[in-house]
Amino acid sequence: QVQLVESGGGLVQPGGSLRLSCEASGYILSINAMGWYRQAPGKQRELVASITSGGSTNYADSVKGRFTISRDKNKMYLQMNSLKAEDTAVYFCNAKRAAGFPGPDDYWGQGSLVTVSP
């Protein structure tokens, strides 16, 4: 099993910055790609950014040029700059199970609330 613990959410003004962190523990050899998802009130959860074990990244169009995902061993980060009100959401850390390992396909963190407001 893998546990994901997030930190770094909070309240920020429009145009400001926040950095989310996610630390994986447990059987971390069993995970492959990691990513950040978010869910705004009344909306479905959506992929924000992902990063493979090799470092390849992918971003939602809405955050390209503003957010940067990075990964260092068992830790993953999301640097969020030029934040907008529409970035307000609960952000979830995600890890994908690598092929050939037991366990669920996805592991999730507990969620971190990011609120962008004047």
Image (tube, helix red, strand yellow):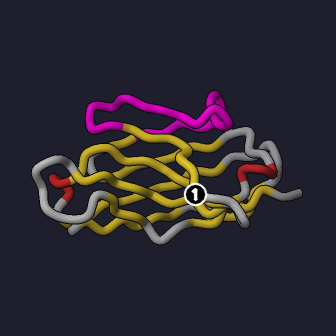
Image location of residue 93, percent across then percent down: 45, 58
Q: Find residue 58 and report its horizontal and vertical position in percent.
A: 47, 32
* Badge 1 amino acid: Arg
Quadrant into which the C terminus falls: bottom right
Residue 2 as seen in the image, left or right of residue 7: left
What residue is rendered at 81% in x and 53% in y?
13
Q: Residues within 10 Å of mark 1 (few under 14, many from 20)?
A: some
Residue 74 vs residue 98, the one in the foreground = 98
Position of the N terminus by quadrant: bottom left
Report the front residue among 3 and 10. Answer: 3
Q: Is residue 19 above or below residue 66?
A: below
Q: Write the residue at 68% across / 60% down.
A: 43
The residue to which callout 1 is attached is 45
User: Which sits in the foreground, 76 or 36?
Assistant: 36
Q: Position of residue 39 (x, y in %)?
A: 62, 60
Is 69 placed left or right of 24 in the picture? right
Give the answer, above or below, for where 95 lies relative to 60.
Answer: below
- The span shown in magenta is 52-70
